[in-house]
Amino acid sequence: MGFSNFLGNEAVVQQLRRSILSGRLPQAMILAGPSGAGKYTLAVMLAQAANCTDPSELEARQPGELPDFCGVCPNCVRIGAAAPLRARFDEAVSAREELREVDKKETRILIQTHPDVLVVPPDPPQLLIKLGQVRRVIHEMYRFPSEAKRAFYIFTSTRFMKEAANSLLKVLEEPPEFATIVLLAENPGELLPTIRSRTSLFTLGALPLEALEGILAAQRAEWKPSQRSLVARLAEGAIGRALAFPLERYLASRQDALVLVRGAIAGPDYSVLFRMTETYRSGAEGQEKMVDLNRALMSLLEDLMLLLAGAPQLVRNIDLTAELAKLAAAVDLQWVERTAGGVVQLESGLRRNLLRSLALDAFANEFVR
Ligand SMILES: [Zn+2]
């Protein structure tokens, strides 16, 4: 347990731990970084570290040793229970579904596994932070923490409804001493400038490729080295994305995407093509499969574009280098751009519920050179 489980971005993590040590953790902060960078994980860890009651954390710390957390004291356990965000969110949403119609409208989604730590996710179905949620934060925030030393209010998104943002702004003008508001932001620019100017910004940067590959080698030993290398590239420096990467699903979609790209370049082998497109059926499962396919198609086209632009070192589907080089030799940039445009159209056609397999066949035919 403890911060040793947080991978990467050591400098930011140390800075925050030092501020806990000196009692100067900001009352309002933005944790910025791409999706999967570990913003939420770190926010929960900070709440644990600021409130851990383990005697070795409280008394036996060496001078200069940075605060950590035990993970097993009552505060750590209850705060840590909020860590699986998706699961807690789904529970809160289904609990609301059970309510009477009138209560449902009044109930906002909040996650609270410890009396002094409140997690505020965007409220469905619009997935925005709403006024009711900020009001609840304001309501709780000015009471002394009951079991924690420092209360935490963690907003997991920067998408605020206008009144909600204005209301938050008022709290930020004079937040209480004993609480910290954490805003998790993929893009801090989405926040009002007046909110940004009242908060301290901490940014989790992308991990270098070698660091991600090293972590995957330790934690995903079952993957082949070429696959770990592929995932490290596709994750774009985000550790969470790398560790949760659906490798098998991606490889299956990419196989189908390759059938389309090969067919578009060399002329389709219709029996292979129809056998593939037939598997894209209507319904939610087919919809997901189609989203995956579009993503894989785009990643192949981007790689072709990189090869044509003379930047082979940036290619992400690194395990296909030889085949991609061959394909790139048969096309030019205009073709790649036109085909990428076709993928976008394919996506919008599917949103209009064109029959998936037909749309795919049409796509394959249109891009035969
Ligand atoms: Zn603890």
Image (cartoon, rainbow, N blue to C red):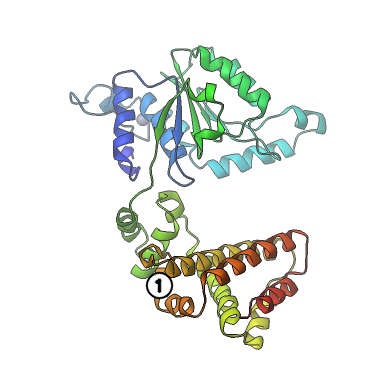
**Residue tagged 1:** 319
When the figure is inspected, residue 357 is found, relative to residue 341, above or below; the finding is below
- Residue 35 pos. (x, y %): 49, 45
When the figure is inspected, residue 60 is found, relative to residue 336, above or below; the finding is above
Could you tell me if residue 317 is visible in this image?
no
Q: Which of 61 and 291 is in front in this view?
A: 291
Q: Nearer the viewer, residue 72 or 237?
A: 237
Q: Residue at x 43, y 42 (%)?
A: 38
> Horizontally, is 341 left or right of 104 in the view?
left
- Using the rendered view, name the quadrant where residue 63 is placed: top left
Could you tell me if residue 133 is visible in this image?
yes
Q: Quadrant of the N terminus?
A: top left
Q: Nearer the viewer, residue 136 or 207?
A: 207
- Residue 316 pos. (x, y %): 42, 64
Q: How many labels does the image show?
A: 1
When the figure is inspected, residue 239 is found, relative to residue 66, above or below; the finding is below
- Using the rendered view, name the quadrant where residue 80 is placed: top left
Farthest left residue in view: 63
